[in-house]
Amino acid sequence: IGASRVKDHKQPVFVLDHNVQDTSEKNLSKYASIESFARENGIDFYPAGRGIGHQVMVEEGYAFPGKFVVGSDSHSNMYGGIGCLGTPVVRTDAASIWATQQTWWQVPPVALVRLNGRLRPGVTGKDVIITLCGLFNNDQVLNHAVEFVGDGVRSLSVDERLTIANMTTEWGALAGVFPIDATTESWLKAREAKLLKKRGGEHPRLNAKAIDELMSDCPAADPDAKYAKEMVLELSKVEPHVSGPDHVKVMQRVKDIEEKKVKVDKAYLVSCVNSRSQDIAVAAELMEGQKVADHVEFYVAAASSEVQMEAEEAGDWNKLLSAGAKPLPPGCGPCIGLGKGLLEDGEVGISATNRNFKGRMGSREAQAYLASPAIVAASAVKGYITRPQAMIDSDVDAAAYDEAKVGTLVGGSSSSSSASSSAQRDLPSLVDGFPATAAAQIVFCDEDNINTDGIYAGKYTYQDGMTPEQMGEVAMDNYDPDFNEFYTEGDILVSGFNFGTGSSREQAATCLKEKGIPMVIAGSFSATYVRNAFNNGYLCVECPGLIDTLRSKGVSKGGLTVRPGITVEVNFPSWELKAEFNDGEHVFPIGPVGEAAQELVVVGGLENWVKANMGH
């Protein structure tokens, strides 16, 4: 990127977590080079095996209540569980921050989520976020920052808050933040005492002085704060649910699905969302004295080495191993399709992770469900998706379930879009060099929530030797293996709503650019995906009207990908799109591209922009 040194060595933190099971010479050499770079620049470094970066950031006080922390991973939202504003950036962003301490932002709207009451026994924070994703599954919080409030917050432990905040990513939000309250303070003080004993001295970040200063001037929302929308969730009415299969925003009551006795082949208690001490203890209690079903493989990995040590000291780790669990090292693994225990063709997995996209945890021909640690443990023992026996016996959710009484949208629109009539908008001017028009035939992928795993599969993400041409060749093949049969170079890719959801992998944008697709037009986008695209000088255009019209006319005919022979013309000065259909020309407003993003397109991406502004 043109910089010779990191500008402030105290700002970055390096944690090796994603591919820790790979002990090949090539991967170890890569890890050694990262460690060497950290040492040369005085950057705090945590090696493979210390744990998942998000957990380490919380444990070591880098993510601290009231701070603003970014991470080059999409689950940086997790820091909101302790009242720290966490949000993802991507690799190019990270490099520019190291070099300049600066980056660019589009400030998001804020959605208020009011949690009332308290959860019933056996119902967990994971059930809360699965329910929110399943109930409000029409992009209500897409690209919003979510603020959690209400008397129900007080009854949620910090571990549960971290779980909920973590999966606001899958809900579509850029951040999910809990208030800093007495629960937060108690957790901080307990953590500070533990670190003090462990270190034999004061921790540099998480110490009594820092906690006192925080609580004496605690950040809080203004009493008259305005919100883009408000949702209410009644915690007492939430029941155990699973997400899926293959989609986070599709949920089923466990009570209903257990009647179908859906056979489980693999079960997972891993990842940054649900592998903390409390999660492992719950699973251990349920599995004590029992065995994993003969046909099930049950994998467990702690969120960090410290969590594993705590679980071992408490006896919980041994209970899981005695029941037949297969241990994996602290870090990312099956959740991102790396290492041991991946799903194979025809298999069904149930996982306490945060994503179940098709092909993410292994084969595209497998199915994955998401659930709480309790449901995962019970299912691993019985061999099919079910609740713990104690919950079945007590019939804790015997009352008739009424989804309408669980959660409601009480203010704001039901979805999010930046495209509206040009007469109603303040339209940005075009910067010098930005194109006035663009026209091409379209290739239409008629599906909402096309995720980055579908665009650029995880099995390619950690192959550092992939050439740009090879990246282009495999683009979209995990979404539709037949995509290349329909696509012609130069076609504009058109897709549904929330395009690019999921991980923050930069390759999901660059692979389309390398394929020769000049731009993506969608009903809406994940803001993290758009950030990736503009950082690489790649254009994304929002046009919900075009998507609605294509669907109303049945253009896709049920196929994953079609090339319908429709040419679109984008006029940027008027921020409109024209498309010729059988019944004549249609004109649609498009979401305007801000001047900062336009500039990134003109210069070819953030790397070139940083070089130019550093004088290189």
Image (cartoon, rainbow, N blue to C red):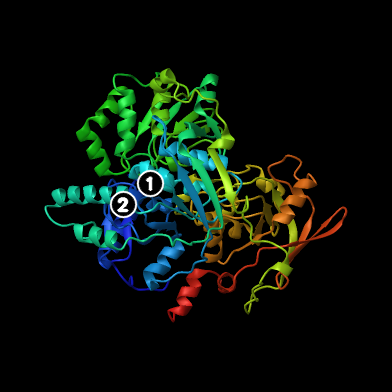
Q: Can see residue 517?
A: no
Find residue 41 and report its horizontal and vertical position in percent. 28, 67
How far apart marks 1 and 2 lie (CA) works out to 10 Å
Q: As rendered, which of 198 and 255 lies closer to the eye?
A: 255
Q: From this view, report whether residue 257 is shown above or below residue 245.
A: above
Residue positioned 38% across, 41% down in the render: 271
Q: From this view, report whether residue 422 is shown above or below residue 489.
A: below
Circle 1 packing at 10 Å, graded few (<14), some (14-19), many (20+), is: many
Mark nearest the camera among 1 and 2 is 1
The residue to which callout 2 is attached is: 58
Query: Label for residue 94?
Result: none
Find residue 152 and report its horizontal and vertical position in percent. 42, 43
Amino acid residing under circle 1: Leu
Query: Label for residue 162?
Result: 1
Amino acid residing under circle 2: Val
Q: Is residue 468 left or right of residue 38?
A: right
Mark 2 secondary-structure assignment:
helix
Q: As rendered, which of 224 and 62 lies closer to the eye?
A: 224
CB under 8 Å between discs 1 and 2: yes
Residue positioned 60% across, 60% down in the render: 513
**Which residue extends farthest right?**
583
Instruction: Answer with the quarter of the image where residue 521 lies.
Output: bottom right
Q: From this view, report whether residue 388 is shown above or below residue 511.
A: above
Find residue 594 and report its horizontal and vertical position in percent. 60, 70
